[in-house]
Amino acid sequence: MRIKSLLVTAILSAIILCSAGFVKAEAVTNCMSYGNISDQITCLTNLIAQLTQQIVQIQAQQGTTQTWCHTFNQNLGFANSGSSEVVNLHTALEKQGISYGSDSITTYDEDTSSAVIQFQTRYGINPRSGYVGPLTRAKLNELYGCSQTTPTITTCTSFGYSSWGPCSSNGVQARTATSYYPAGCTGGAPILYQSCSYNSYCTENNWTSTLNPTTCPAPGQQTRIWTKVGVCQNGTSHPATETITCTPPTTPVATCTSFNYSDWGACSTSGTQTRSVTASFPSGCAGGSPVYSQTCEQYVFPPEITVIVPNGGEEWLVGKTYDIIWGRFALKPTDGLYIYLTDGVPGHLPYDITPADQPLSVNTTRYSWTVPSTIVPRSTYKIGVKAVSGTISAEDTSDNYFRIDSLMTTSAAVITSFKATHNSVTPSVWLLTWSTRNTSGCKLSWPGIQRVESQVVPTSGSKDVFVINANTSYGLTCDGINGASGVSQAIHVGSVSR
């Protein structure tokens, strides 16, 4: 009933204004063509507002003078709602062309407060509080106070506006005048309404979606497909598709009852060795009680040095250079290596081949030594190698005596030693070592694939050889000194006992 009453009131108001000649009757008829009552009321309300502005403009053009007056002697606010002073305030606001909205003629509520703010904005009154205080009363009394002189009323010629509001369903959008020029003017014809194209804004109700696949798969992701329902623009939107996270349905998982393992790892210094699970049964199971570790006893290999050359039976000459060769195992990184010579004579101290303050690196396995002239020829020499890090970690000497002689220039050439030692780590590698006396040069030879291969070598030395076939023959041939006869000797590598 209330909506119908408002509609009737709006129609009557429009008809009265039509009869007064301010608007054509077709405008009212157009509003009534809307099928929705709410749209009809909105259209008529906008029409009435436009007609009211036309009346104010016509009155201003006809030079209408102000005949109503009232002197405002008290401040006004929400607390004064219902008083006669609020009626006078509403009258003054109407004469300014400012609407107090849905408030009744005696009500001072939010709409009246908003109207007062418009009045304060128009005349530059601060603060713009919506409350009628001394400054606002002074302006009201200047305009409408009951005095001997009637203030001059200036018609507004230009305006400042707010932004256009949204387009309503009847194709009209509105805005408000926020400032008036010149200052203190009234009336005028601000453009508060304009026609527009109404488009419904999209809301969440305009969208529907489906999931693909419909049930959450194991990876935990689904594709949501969005579809727009109806005709709308802007507002709520969604992409055509989007990936979402989901929780797959849970299924009971069997407990593992047996396992396959990797080999046990090395025993650590803490006495523990570990392994990992390589397979669990039944398939797809979880949990269980796999055995990942066990106690163990760590075996620590003792450090070891083995003198290889000379190891007994060799003959070295004073002034000649020879390689001292040894093997080492499990030595400490902090160890230093020292080489010395013993002559087998009781009471004689070892002869330091390497200086006591210049140890060799622990990784060294070969040292070239030129026999000094101070060495007395003797057949009871041994070479010693020791690893020292504060204390002696490991030490070894030649298994048997070897000979050191003075260099002879007229004696016949002699191969004092020619041996093959098997490498226990790499079975196909052998170490050939030899020493000679009274020789000026030597050559090592062996059978190649298509011919005999040979290589010039020192008169005493060593060489690693790679042997594939057992009983491969290697020959050593050396020339004599000063035309003396040479000498040669062969050895079968692969059949030599260690």
Image (cartoon, rainbow, N blue to C red):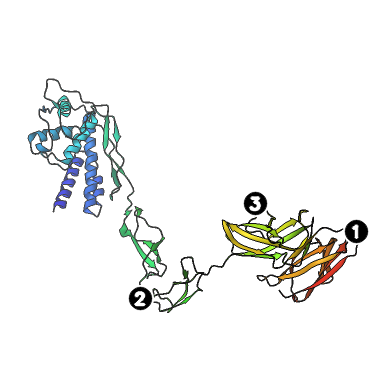
Q: Calculate the distance from the C-alpha at mark 2 to the C-alpha at mark 1.
A: 96 Å
Pointers 2 and 1 in contact (CB under 8 A)? Answer: no
- Res. 232 image quadrant: bottom left
Q: Earlier in the sequence, mark 2 or mark 1?
A: 2
Label 3: few (<14), some or many (≥20) within 10 Å? few
Percent from the top left, x then y, of residue 220?
A: 40, 66
Q: Are marks 1 and 3 in contact (CB under 8 Å)?
A: no
> How crowded is the residue under tag 2: few (<14 C-alpha within 10 Å), some, or many (20+)?
few
Q: Residue at x 21, y 45 (%)?
A: 45
Disc 1: CA contacts within 10 A as few (<14), some (14-19) or many (>=20)? few
Residue 126 occupies quadrant: top left
Task: Please state the horizontal and vertical placement of residue 38, each as a whole percent of the image.
Answer: 22, 52
Label 3: state its secondary structure: loop
The residue singled out by tag 1 in the image is: 482
Q: Is residue 257 left or right of residue 411?
A: left
Residue positioned 42% across, 67% down in the render: 219
